[in-house]
Image (tube, helix red, strand yellow):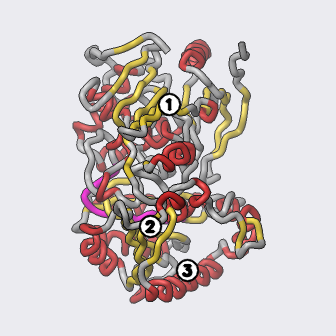
């Protein structure tokens, strides 16, 4: 019998490489080993946090001076039903491991982010979205069931009908109500390993969203890219890509395109230079003049590409752009980067997004990458989604300029909140307690804090993000809450 995993004291960085915490990292393989960590943390009087692929830009998967559960060893595919398209996995299973298990049976994940290295546990805890949120919703809307381990050792099953209140709160609940130990997911039937993609050039944010509206009915995926380095009349210029799944019979060689070998991302640039080396070359362009050039070149080449019309592209190549250049984020060193992602109702999105980019320019920190998506509401308690659009902005952080970036971001928050918008916990580095008080209905926030007290009365589960945003709100409220009833199982 293998020995239980021992905690090791490590310095753990956020994905954006700006925040860092010292934690006792443990890699559990079983539910019982997670229970052991809960017991050890309770005995030492310290906190526990969860970490999957470590893809949160900010401090959502950091826990200073506590135990950090690293779920990469708890990554088994437990069940796969190719007739029903139901996949049951452990929390450390990645998007990559899932689609590689199901694609040759004709199934793909209904919702994927820009990288395939996200885990199911992290995707559920943050309720991630993809380029088709307007169509199929968030990641959580396709979760059929999950098992949640509470800090008192109970294991409960949650579905849209069983323990529904917890189901709606734990999905998007930041891993702060309990630990996902298994997730059952509804996959999407696909009839080809290819998508039909059509690019468009746009001159402004307004034109982008008008195009989104026009394409939405016939699109399975929509995403916009914008040149964040320009202002004035060029503000918002960029590209839109519409994609749709091929219908049964549209791909004459579906048996080949559904093979895993057809989905491999290119490993070499121009067939010569290993992609893993490219981040070092990117470093020379990670400054304002360099990124003005890069964005201008992308705008120019994108317009030429759009003129050529429709083409077909493999699922992995279309979706996982962040995986093309391994380690690309290292080009942002030594300071790192943050991503500011705003979700704004449809009526205000164009003007707010223009103001956000202008605000960043005025403060001397223009966004090196800008991406827009279309969104719809979902039923989850702490969701970021609105009936509107999102703008994600990658912002470089320097060692001397960190405080200036944070001050700039506070002003950006105000623009979003004044328009009835929200921010995204998976990307966040800067939110304050007052941010969530303004962004969420009071009832939603009170239910979340009540469930936190009921399911984790000792506040054992606390990440640095939770301490920054939610702990002050909890401390300002009475600690006594009425008991609740859950359907539970004590087994592993």
Tell me which corner region of the image, top left, top right, bottom left or bottom right, holds residue 71.
Answer: top right
Q: Mark 3 points at which residue?
A: 295
Pointer 1 and pointer 2: residues touching (CB < 8 Å)? no
Q: Is mark 2 on a helix, strand or loop?
A: loop
Queried whether the magenta region covers residue 385, the answer comes back as yes
Report how far apart the C-alphas of labels 1 and 2 lie in the structure: 52 Å
In the rendered view, tell whether residue 368 sits above or below residue 289. above
> Which range of residues does the magenta coloring cover?
384-394
Q: Which of marks 3 and 1 is nearer the N terminus?
A: 3
Tell me which corner region of the image, top left, top right, bottom left or bottom right, holds residue 472.
Answer: top left
The answer to whether residue 330 is seen in the rendering is yes
- Point out the frontmost of discs 2 and 3: 2
Tell me which corner region of the image, top left, top right, bottom left or bottom right, holds residue 154.
Answer: top left
Report how far apart the C-alphas of labels 3 and 1 lie in the structure: 39 Å
In the rendered view, tell whether residue 99 sits above or below residue 204. above
Q: Which of marks 1 and 2 is nearer the N terminus?
A: 2
Magenta-drawn stretch, dominant element (helix, strand or loop): strand
Q: In this view, does 79 lie to the left or right of 444?
A: right
Q: Name the residue under label 1.
A: 462
Q: Mark 2 points at which residue?
A: 252
Q: Which residue is drawn at 66% across and 65% down?
A: 266
Q: In this view, does 148 lie to the left or right of 364?
A: left
């Amino acid at each position: 019998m293998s020995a239980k995993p021992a905690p090791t004291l490590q310095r753990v960085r956020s994905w954006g490489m700006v925040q860092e915490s010292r934690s006792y990292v443990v890699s559990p393989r079983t539910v019982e080993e997670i229970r052991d960590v809960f017991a050890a943390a309770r005995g030492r009087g310290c906190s526990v946090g969860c970490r999957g692929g470590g893809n949160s830009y900010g401090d959502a998967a950091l826990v200073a001076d506590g135990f950090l559960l690293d779920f990469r060893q708890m990554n088994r595919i437990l069940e796969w039903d190719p007739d029903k398209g139901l996949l049951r996995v452990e929390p450390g299973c990645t998007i990559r491991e899932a689609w590689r298990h199901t694609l040759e049976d004709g199934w793909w994940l209904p919702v994927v982010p820009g990288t395939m290295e996200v885990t199911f546990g992290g995707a559920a805890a943050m309720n991630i979205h993809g380029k088709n949120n307007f169509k199929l919703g968030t990641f959580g809307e396709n979760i059929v069931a999950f098992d949640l381990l509470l800090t008192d050792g109970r294991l409960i099953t949650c579905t849209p009908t069983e323990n529904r209140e917890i189901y709606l709160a734990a999905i998007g609940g930041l891993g702060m109500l309990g630990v996902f130990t298994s997730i059952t997911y509804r996959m999407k039937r696909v009839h080809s390993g290819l998508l039909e993609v059509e690019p468009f050039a746009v001159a402004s944010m307004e034109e982008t969203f008008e195009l989104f509206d026009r394409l939405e009915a016939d699109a399975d995926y929509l995403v916009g890219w914008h040149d964040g380095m320009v202002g004035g009349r060029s503000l918002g210029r960029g590209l839109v890509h519409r994609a749709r799944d091929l219908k049964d019979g549209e791909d004459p060689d579906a048996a080949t395109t559904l093979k895993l070998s057809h989905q491999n991302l290119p490993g070499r640039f121009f067939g010569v230079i290993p992609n893993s080396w490219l981040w070092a070359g990117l470093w020379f362009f990670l400054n304002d003049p360099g990124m003005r050039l890069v964005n201008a070149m992308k705008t120019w080449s994108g317009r030429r590409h759009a003129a050529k019309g429709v083409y077909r592209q493999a699922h992995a190549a279309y979706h996982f752009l962040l995986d093309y250049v391994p380690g690309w984020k290292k080009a942002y060193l030594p300071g790192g980067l943050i991503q500011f992602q705003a979700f704004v109702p449809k009526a205000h999105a164009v003007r707010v997004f223009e103001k956000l980019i202008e605000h960043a320019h005025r403060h001397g920190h223009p966004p090196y990458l800008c991406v827009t998506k279309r969104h719809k509401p979902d039923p989850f308690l702490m969701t970021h989604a609105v009936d509107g659009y999102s703008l994600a902005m990658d912002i470089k952080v320097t060692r001397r300029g960190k405080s200036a970036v944070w001050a700039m971001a506070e002003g950006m928050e105000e623009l979003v909140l004044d328009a009835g918008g929200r921010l995204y916990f998976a990307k966040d580095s800067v939110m304050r307690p007052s941010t969530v008080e303004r962004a969420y209905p009071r009832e939603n926030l009170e239910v979340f804090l009540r469930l936190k007290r009921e399911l984790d009365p000792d506040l054992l589960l606390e990440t640095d993000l939770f301490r920054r945003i939610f702990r002050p709100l909890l401390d300002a409220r009475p600690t006594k809450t009425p008991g609740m009833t859950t359907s539970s199982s004590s087994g592993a």
